Image (cartoon, grey):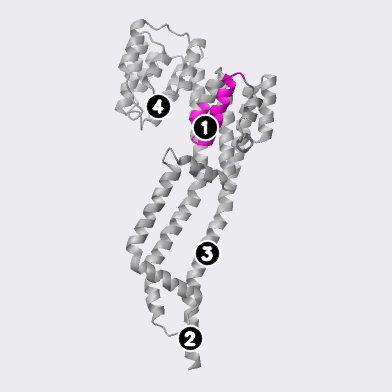
Amino acid sequence: MPSRKPTVAAVERVSSDYHYSKISLMGIGKERDYFIENLATLLASGMDVSVAIEAIKGGIRSKTMKEIIGQVKDAVDSGSTLWRALEATQLLSGPVISLVRLGEESGQLSANLTVIVNQQRKDRLFRSKVRSAMLYPALVIIIGIVVSLGISWFILPRLSTVFSSLHVTLPLITRVMIAVGAWVGQYGSLVIPLLLLVLIVVWYILFVFHPTKHVGQRLLFALPGVGRLIQEVELARFGYVLGTLLDAGLTVPKSMRSLRDTTELKFYQSFYENLRQGVEEGNSFQKCFVAFGSTDQLIPPPIQQMMMAAERSGILASTLLKIGETFEDRAETTTKNLSVLIEPVLLALIWVGVVAVAMAVILPVYSILGGLNRM
């Protein structure tokens, strides 16, 4: 599709009318994806940009998104290019805007929009793989904590009262249980809510709070199995996003910036930023890999060798796409295997807790029965 030269009035209007902050754009992610997906489909069918935008606007529910689309349409009708109108809204990231601009200038707008759609779909897929793998063990651990707190708070204090009144020598495990039950019965109303609050705060600091969430990410990356899955998902994203953007015509630095923005892992963000800066300075991937000290922990040496060979032979984009496909398949397999491996470990931990409580209750009963038989 040929690009249109924007008029001065249209450009000034775009620059002055759009003042959407990041806060005002929160919560419209799904409708943003809906807009891009439908725009790519309609443009591929031969529809004009302005008509396509107007058609999409009718299916949008968010008031903010409707305002954005309406102003984009007004700017396009006034002679502005689509990429400039979208850039002013801050609706899309810089590299995505670069793809839209490149598509308009080369007449491949619908194709580049399709690339954006596929990239967003893959990114959602990669995120869901990690979340689905962590959901089951997290759920079991939460249930285990709740059950343990319930036993400690409601059952152990009552059992400790019963066993304390018996004039028999109690086993060590029962004496420990009595001590715990008595302590929880006395201080449980204060300690248990405080413990839950501490757990919530620690979880927030490690996995939500932006300045410190890299610590929790590092802890997950160090866990056997989980770290491997995270690396495979990230390498699948690395190969697919970088390969797709390079294949679409973006430069390596712009592609690396987009890749950096798609990942939530701080240490990979730092790695991608170092690669981007190194490439901008004219260095090869080989020099960039050597300059970054922990490259081998993030990208396996064989993958590094493949990228360096592909860079020299001029087939970097296709090689990266193959890397993405390979690690996407590996991540799928690891996700299934991880659930199978974690399940018996969690069940074993629960079994140990149940057996400990059962022994603490049953052993004194045997002592009492033995005393009755000797009478």
The dot on residue 369 is: 2
Give, as a single range, the part of the protein colored magenta: 258-282
Q: Is there any visible trace of residue 244 in the rendered image? A: no
Q: Is residue 34 above or below residue 349?
A: above
Give the Cα separation between the discs numbered 2 and 1: 66 Å
The dot on residue 255 is: none
Q: Is residue 79 above or below residue 62?
A: above
The dot on residue 351 is: 3
Give the Cα separation between the discs numbered 2 and 4: 72 Å
Question: Is there CB contact under 8 Å for labels 2 and 1?
Answer: no
The dot on residue 269 is: 1
Which one is earlier in the sequence, the residue at label 3 or at label 4? Answer: 4
Q: Residues within 10 Å of mark 2 (few under 14, many from 20)?
A: few
Give the Cα separation between the discs numbered 2 and 3: 26 Å
Where residue 359 appears, as percent x and y from the top left, is 50, 73
**Closer to the camera in the image, 218 or 81:** 218
Give the Cα separation between the discs numbered 1 and 4: 24 Å
Where residue 344 appears, as percent x and y from the top left, is 57, 57
Q: Can residue 145 be found in the magenta stretch?
A: no
